Amino acid sequence: MRRIDLASAGFLLLEKRETPMHVGGINLFTLPEGVDEQEFLTSLRTQLRENTEFRKPFGEYVVTGKTGLYWEKDEHIDMDYHVRHSALPSPGRYRELFALASRFHTTLLDRTRPLWELHLIEGLQDRQFAVYNKVHHAAIDGVGAMHITQAMCTESPSGPPGYAPYSLEAYKAYKQSRFGDVAKATKPSKRDMRNVLEALKQQYDSSINLATAMRRFGLAFVGRSGNLAVPWHNVPKTSINTRVSGARRFVAQTFAFDRVKEVCRALDATVNDVVLAMCAGALRRYLLSRDELPLHSLKAMAPVSLREEGDVDSSNAIGFITADMATNIYDPEKRLRTIQESMRAGKDLLRELSPAEGALFMQLTQLPALLTSILGLGSKFPAFSTVVSNVPGPRKPLYWHGARLDGIYPASIVFDGFAMNITLVSYHDQLDFGIVACRRSMPQIQRIIDHLEDSLAELEAVAGLSGSGARTSNNQRGSRTPAKTRVKAKAKTKSKVKAKAASKTKAKTTRKAPSKAKPAAKTKAKLGARKSAVKPKLARN
């Protein structure tokens, strides 16, 4: 048996029927030319079920010992249970795919078995098929999931066929080809730690660094840590911060990476800054449409990786920064700058810590969130408003058994106090968004997709990118448009989007209170006009 570390065990302890703690998503593929869909998928399913050697912990299940939770090897894995084959009802649109993924993401994983499932899904239009996978968060984080995706795929359609996602063979080949000897040197050698005085000095320095970080963290609650945002401090209550049911809803969309990069260059911002600003603008629009935009800004948990170079073995090596989403600011440029300042302060805090110190700091600061969730108080005392996670993915096109990987759409977790989760993956020349929400708390979550497009167009207008506001992404997931087909907006729509975005930029005023009837009415009217001008791109599921 292997002990499960505290960070991973926390996801197991938090899990209950209403709050499944698995992550996963949809990988969308196009069949190789000339192959028969039924024969190809049947062969693929057979190969997956024949795999018997797994990387840790995908061949293990959870057991409870006297001193904690442990991984125990499963000597009799039922591959027919773990690898499943489904078909979409006609007409096989993304709408039907997302509805099926929503149902899959709702059910708990069986703890008496290894904590993963893989579903081959056929019946999509335009010779596409999908793979929905889900893995317990105790077994993997976002960066680890990207390592698995790259390990199973190849960079050439005519190269090796590819591997089973969780196979030991894929793990060994990927680790050697990608990292070589670097992956073997993630821990200090005996020679490095031979000097006892040096070891004691490192411990002393770690104590000083942690004490300094905890002091800055605590001072933020009394407004004495500059722009540093922290959990629980001035976190407003909205419909996002409620108790959740067990049912989930999943929607997804692709945005062209070049659009975001152009905004980054024009406004001197990072990709993560612009993505957070997109999400902030979308959340602001969503709450305005429900007449519940709060006086205080929403706060988002922005996960960051604490993995050392070459570390492909850790189940979870993540921390977080609290991002001030500036949703109470009307002006999009000012909103972006506020987000930048907040993220810069959070990064400065973590930059002073080593990966080991950062992991300990995160465990200490996340302990109250763990306790409130266990006690059922997460919705009454929310630490954050939502989660926005940006996971760096493969930078080159990938293929699996000759099938082109068209998109990676992540599906993450929600729980009491966090009824919605926005996760995105950067893949090749696109940004793939996956949004998961409680079906009861946020029944119209698909509107966030439209609001993200409006928010990006608004930032493009601020950046002075002529005509860019009306462009749409290459892969409109959930629309009727086939993959890799550019959708052209009507000229009338383009002019209206530019005019609206330009007028909003000139206003540069901050919304002070949601209770005033006049500004709220004006904003609703603008949103209503914009919705009538821009045709929704997402099929409603």
Image (cartoon, rainbow, N blue to C red):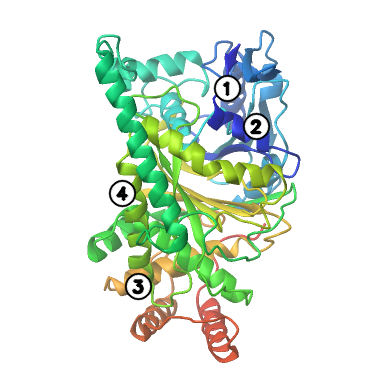
Give the residue pinned by disc 4: 348
Residue at (58% x, 88% y) in the render: 516
Task: Decide which of 176, 7 is in the foreground and name it.
Answer: 7
Per the rendering, the mark at residue 4 is 1
Q: How far apart are labels 4 and 3 at the CA level?
A: 21 Å
- The residue mark sitting in front, 4 or 3, is 4
Task: Decide which of 277, 346 is in the foreground and name it.
Answer: 346
Which secondary structure, mark 1?
loop
| Residue 521, picture quadrant | bottom right
Amino acid at the residue labelled 4: Asp
Above or below, 275 relative to 289: above
Amino acid at the residue labelled 1: Ile
Which secondary structure, mark 4?
helix
Q: Earlier in the sequence, mark 4 or mark 3?
A: 3
On screen, residue 530 versus residue 343, left or right, reads right
Q: Quadrant of the C terminus?
A: bottom right
Q: Earlier in the sequence, mark 2 or mark 3?
A: 2
The reply to whether residue 360 is visible in this rendering is yes
- The residue mark sitting in front, 3 or 1, is 1
Q: How far apart are labels 3 and 1 at the CA level?
A: 44 Å
Residue at (29% x, 16% y) in the render: 180
Amino acid at the residue labelled 3: Lys
Which residue extends farthest bottom? 518
Per the rendering, the mark at residue 334 is 3
Which secondary structure, mark 2?
helix
Above or below, 505 relative to 265: below
Query: Is the residue under label 1 in contact with that under label 2 (CB below 8 Å)?
Result: yes
